[in-house]
Image: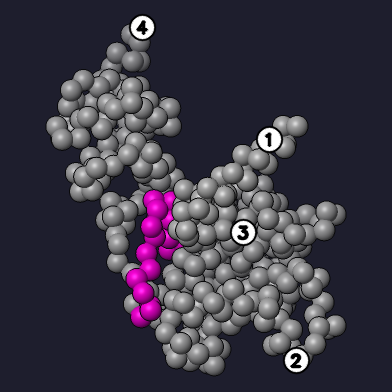
């Protein structure tokens, strides 16, 4: 019986300009594709042959995308190509135009807003093509900001009627009665980051108009109970501080023609130790459900000051060392 690796199933001739990239660092890219797609690849010169594997046609499509990406962008790193491979594996329907797109998400934004890393491009793609998206990762990776930008785009284009921005007021124990001032004064400190992002994206007069009309609503998570929201875009920020019960309550608010994006950093949980984080639990409960996607960010996706990347990485290394001890 012949070996399955002796049968050529398909081949692809790559452009001579991208040959050095494909074979760089001891064939790192080819080995990564082999492991991720469970195929066997024979590569000589410009000819790459897929010798074995059920996903060989997907690999050919991937090779074509990598070739076009390198030719259009010019100089790229292997890390960048590997990120592209992961994205294509995660979202096979993503196009090269989406990956290379640099136009602003929001038509009337105060400044151009677009995904700056490949992982952020995957995030925006998933938001546009799924009902529920969870984004998990450190601060500064654009989790909430990009979700708000897509939501505003949907509102401006009248694809939805309302945006709901919410977050847990965990520091006040969701019991705001003892704080001074009226209701708005009580909840504003906990929701201020959402207002800041909103007014950073939209001109002040337009943001005020949406708020006055009730087309954009900013409220504590506890105030979502008992509502069913149709034609709406829901964003739950700081979701690591939602309890299991609150997460279930929020997700069951989703009505017809609605989307939900849940963002959080599971390394920054402020809940009492006896309380389970709804975001941590959701990763286990909802994994594999069609229409629900999880996107994970790391320090490479941080779009703030470069020092923030180094700070996040240093804390990550420290925490890993502490866990080992």
Label 3 and label 1: CA atoms lie apart by: 23 Å
**Element at badge 1?**
helix
Is residue 41 found left or right of 182 in the rendered image? Answer: left
**Counting other residues with Cα less than 10 Å from the Cα at mark 4, is it few (<14), some (14-19), or many (20 or more)?**
few
Mark 2 near mark 1, Cβ–Cβ under 8 Å? no
Region of the chain picked out in magenta, as a range = 108-128
Residue 56 marker: none
**Earlier residue among tags 3 and 4:** 4
Relative to 113, say whether 218 is above or below. Answer: below
Q: Identify the residue position indicated by label 2 in the image.
A: 182
Which is nearer the eye, 210 or 114? 114
Secondary structure at badge 3 equals: strand
Q: Earlier in the sequence, mark 2 or mark 1?
A: 2
Foreground mark, 3 or 4? 3
Q: Is residue 168 above or below residue 211?
A: above
Looking at the image, tell me whether mark 3 or mark 1 is earlier in sequence order: 3
Say which of 166 and 202 sits in front: 202
User: How many C-alpha atoms fall within 10 Å of the one at disc 1: few (<14), some, or many (≥20)?
Assistant: few
Residue 315 locus on image (x, y percent) = 63, 46
Disc 2 from disc 1: Cα separation: 46 Å
The alpha-carbon separation of the residues under discs 4 and 1 comes to 50 Å
Bin the neighbour count of mark 3 within 10 Å (Cα to Cα): few under 14, some 14-19, many 20 and up.
many
- The residue under the point 43% across, 63% down is 128
Residue beneath label 3, please? 264
Looking at the image, is mark 4 or mark 1 earlier in the sequence?
4
Does residue 66 show up?
yes
Element under label 2?
loop
Q: Nearer the viewer, mark 2 or mark 1?
A: 1
Q: CA distance from mark 2 to mark 4?
A: 80 Å
């Amino acid at each position: 019986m012949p070996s399955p690796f002796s049968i050529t199933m398909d081949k692809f001739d790559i452009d001579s300009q991208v040959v050095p990239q494909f074979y760089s660092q001891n064939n790192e890219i080819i080995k990564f594709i082999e492991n991720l797609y469970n195929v066997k690849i024979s590569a000589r010169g410009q000819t790459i042959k897929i010798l074995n594997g059920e996903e060989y046609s997907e690999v050919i499509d991937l090779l074509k995308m990598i070739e076009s990406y390198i030719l259009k962008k010019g100089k790229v790193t292997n890390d960048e190509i590997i990120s592209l491979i992961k994205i294509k594996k995660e979202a096979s329907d993503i196009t090269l135009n989406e990956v290379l797109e640099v136009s602003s998400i929001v038509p009337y934004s105060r400044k151009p807003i677009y995904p700056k890393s490949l992982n952020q491009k995957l995030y925006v793609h998933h938001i546009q093509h799924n009902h529920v998206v969870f984004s998990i990762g450190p601060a500064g990776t654009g989790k909430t900001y990009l979700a708000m930008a897509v939501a505003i785009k949907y509102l401006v284009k009248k694809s939805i009627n309302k945006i709901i921005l919410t977050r847990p007021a965990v520091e006040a124990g969701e019991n705001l009665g003892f704080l001074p001032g009226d209701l708005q004064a009580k909840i504003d400190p906990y929701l201020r980051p959402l207002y800041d992002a909103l007014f950073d994206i939209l001109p002040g007069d337009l943001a005020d108009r949406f708020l006055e009309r009730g087309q954009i609503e900013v409220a504590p998570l506890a105030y979502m109970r008992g509502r069913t929201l149709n034609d709406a875009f829901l964003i739950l920020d700081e979701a690591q501080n939602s309890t299991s019960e609150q997460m279930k309550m929020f997700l069951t608010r989703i009505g017809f023609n609605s989307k939900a994006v849940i963002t959080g950093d599971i390394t920054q949980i402020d809940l009492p130790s006896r309380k389970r984080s709804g975001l941590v639990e959701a990763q286990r409960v909802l994994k594999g459900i069609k229409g629900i996607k999880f996107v994970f960010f790391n320090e490479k996706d941080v779009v703030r000051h470069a020092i923030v990347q180094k700070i996040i990485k240093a804390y990550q290394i420290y925490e890993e060392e502490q866990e080992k001890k």
